[in-house]
Image: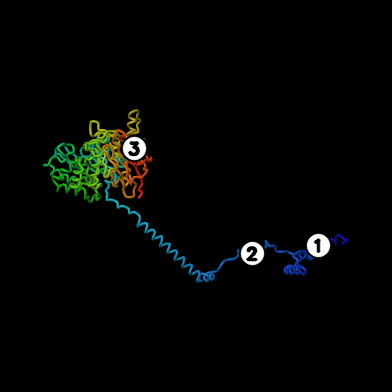
């Protein structure tokens, strides 16, 4: 015991210093005893305690050693890569890769060889790409009553997706007066040459080609080329006029009564064809020569197509006077079977025949427009046919243009009907100009009777279109059969949208049509 407090404090300090000293002697012997399998308890020396490694710390050190492993160096990798086992493995993988690649290449070639080949597109021209729109009377077409007024309506024509416009005749031609004929002068009531050139430029900017009707005696009654004695001199004068008008930029010429001049003066007719169809340095693009005939027999029309060599021939095949749909079907089938469809043109009316709604009746106007724009060949419509314009005491009724003015009662209903008809025409015209099956596809007659007609338009792997018509005053169930008809088809357009709504699905093998109704169905190619 310490008797003095200072001695006690000194003893405490000595004890602390001893604890700070490292273990020696007995401590080391304690560690040796532990490493030799001693009792496992720490031996304590008088100056401190033994620090032991516990299992958790040993595991951590082992993990640290593993993390610090940096892998093989370059020399070691090269030695391993050069061993026979790895060399054989690399060659095996390389062989597998190239075999797989060659197998995929062979499979692709096999698929291509076995796939159905695309059908070669037929040779077509711009007049095969959409409908032609006839303006046979300039004064009746616009309020301006001249060619400038027609130019102002080019945007409206473009909206209707027409591909070409046939204008005139415009030249000075006193009725039945061959001596007073002046091909190169625009009749004053129609405007002037500068207005015509403006119309051509405006139309062509919109992608609309302009065809000029140069029929000589268009106001007379003795025949388009006057008489057999005058046709030679008239044809000779026409040759120089053709060069003049083609130099003004027109895209083609239309002539009525082609059978007469081709038969009476075949050499002059050959010259006329060459001037129009061969192009000039000023306009090397293809121009169209359109012939118009009053013939209605398919045999006569086929003969004229061959003898005249025109690019398109407008006939009266659809204006036979018969209301029998089966007769129309036979005529269409004959013309299609024996002629190149790119040379067929279809029209119900025209400058001398009048308007569609007056010829077939207002109730069947849309039905016949549907027929006109889905047949194989080029559809030709008269101005105003797109709105159901009627001939009221004249074959040149005033065209009706819809303005933004407020209308009431009956006038408002009439305007709504005109707008609906124009949309119907525009939809059909756009389809006709972009769908290959409708533009130049094959024509297959599926069914025809005295009051109904069904045919199929198809091209290679393009979507198919089925056109069905019922001219009767009562409903009809058209039962069709054929391996090419699917279980379901979608309604693309219908003359009565309430009965067959657009985009609805129907069974084309059992098709119900209302009175005076027509429809166009679409279904995909299935191989």
Do the numbered discs 2 and 3 sit on residues whose CB atoms are within 8 Å? Answer: no
For the residues labelled 1 and 2, the Cα–Cα distance comes to 41 Å
* Mark sitting earlier along the chain (2/3): 2
**Residue 62 marker:** 2
- Distance from disc 2 to disc 3, alpha carbons, whole Å, reads 87 Å
Q: What residue do we see at 27% from left, 49% from top?
A: 124
Mark 2 burial class by Cα count in 10 Å: few <14, some 14-19, many 20+:
few
Pick the quarter of the image with the N terminus.
bottom right
> Element under label 3?
strand
> Which label sits in the foreground, 1 or 2?
2
Q: Residues within 10 Å of mark 1 (few under 14, many from 20)?
A: few
- Sequence-first disc among 1 and 3: 1
Q: Position of residue 141 (x, y in %)?
A: 26, 36
44 relative position to 281: left or right = right
Please say if 146 is above or below 115.
above
User: First in sequence: mark 1 or mark 2?
Assistant: 1
Neighbourhood count class around disc 3 (C-alpha, 10 Å): few under 14, some 14–19, many 20 upward:
some
Q: Nearer the viewer, mark 1 or mark 3?
A: 3
- Image position, residue 191 (x, y; %): 23, 38
Disc 1: which residue: 13
Check disc 1 and report its element: helix, strand or loop.
Answer: helix
Relative to residue 459, is residue 350 depicted above or below?
A: above
Horizontal side of residue 484 vs 54, given as left or right: left
For label 3, the residue is 512
Colour convention: rainbow
- How many discs mark residues in the rendered view? 3
Distance, label 1 to label 3, CA atoms, is 118 Å
Seen from the viewer's position, the closer of residues 408 and 109 is 109
- Describe the element under mark 2 as helix, strand or loop: helix
Quadrant of res 263: top left
Q: Position of residue 71 (x, y in %)?
A: 56, 66
Q: Which mark is residue 310?
A: none
């Amino acid at each position: 015991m310490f008797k003095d407090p200072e001695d006690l404090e000194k003893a405490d300090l000595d004890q602390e210093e001893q604890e700070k000293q490292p273990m020696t002697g007995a401590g080391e012997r304690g560690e040796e005893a532990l490493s030799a399998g001693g009792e496992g308890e720490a031996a304590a020396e008088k100056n401190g305690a033994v620090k032991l490694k516990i299992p958790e710390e040993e595991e951590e050190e082992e993990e640290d050693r593993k993390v610090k492993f940096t892998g093989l160096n370059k020399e070691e990798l090269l030695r391993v890569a050069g061993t026979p086992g790895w060399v054989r493995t690399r060659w095996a993988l390389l062989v597998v890769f190239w075999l797989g690649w060659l197998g995929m290449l062979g499979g692709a070639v096999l698929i291509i060889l076995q796939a159905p080949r695309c059908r070669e597109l037929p040779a077509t021209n711009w007049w095969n790409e959409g409908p032609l729109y006839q303006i046979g009377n300039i004064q009746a077409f616009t309020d301006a009553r001249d060619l400038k007024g027609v130019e102002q309506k080019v945007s409206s024509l473009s909206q209707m997706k027409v591909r070409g416009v046939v204008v005139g005749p415009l030249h000075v031609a006193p009725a039945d007066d061959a001596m007073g004929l002046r091909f190169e002068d625009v009749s004053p009531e129609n405007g002037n040459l500068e207005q015509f050139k403006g119309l051509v430029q405006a139309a062509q900017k919109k992608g609309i080609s302009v065809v000029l009707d140069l029929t000589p005696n268009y106001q007379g009654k003795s025949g388009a080329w006057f008489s057999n004695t005058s046709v030679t001199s008239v044809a000779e004068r026409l040759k120089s006029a053709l060069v003049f008008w083609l130099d003004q930029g027109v895209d083609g010429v239309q002539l009525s009564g082609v059978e007469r001049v081709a038969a009476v003066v075949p050499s002059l007719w050959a010259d006329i064809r060459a001037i129009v169809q061969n192009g000039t340095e000023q306009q090397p693009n293809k121009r169209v020569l359109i012939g118009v005939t009053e013939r209605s027999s398919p045999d006569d029309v086929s003969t004229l197509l061959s003898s005249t060599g025109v690019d398109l021939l407008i006939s009266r095949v659809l204006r036979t006077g018969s209301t029998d749909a089966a007769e129309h079907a036979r005529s269409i089938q004959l013309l299609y079977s024996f002629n190149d469809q790119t040379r067929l043109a279809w029209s119900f009316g025209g400058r001398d025949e009048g308007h569609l709604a007056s010829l077939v009746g207002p109730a069947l106007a849309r039905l016949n427009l549907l027929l006109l724009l889905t047949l194989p060949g080029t559809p030709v419509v008269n101005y105003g046919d797109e709105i159901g314009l009627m001939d009221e005491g004249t074959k040149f009724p005033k065209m009706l243009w819809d303005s933004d003015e407020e209308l009431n009662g009956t006038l408002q209903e009439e305007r709504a009907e005109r707008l609906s008809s124009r949309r119907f025409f525009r939809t059909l015209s756009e389809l006709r100009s972009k769908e290959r099956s409708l533009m130049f596809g094959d024509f297959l007659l599926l069914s025809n009777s005295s009051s109904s007609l069904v045919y199929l338009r198809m091209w290679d792997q393009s979507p198919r279109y089925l056109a069905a018509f019922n001219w009767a005053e009562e409903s009809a169930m058209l039962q069709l059969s054929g391996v090419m008809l699917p279980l379901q088809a979608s309604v693309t357009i219908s003359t009565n949208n309430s009965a067959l709504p657009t985009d609805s699905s129907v069974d084309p093998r059992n098709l119900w049509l209302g009175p005076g109704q027509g429809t166009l169905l679409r279904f995909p190619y299935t191989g």
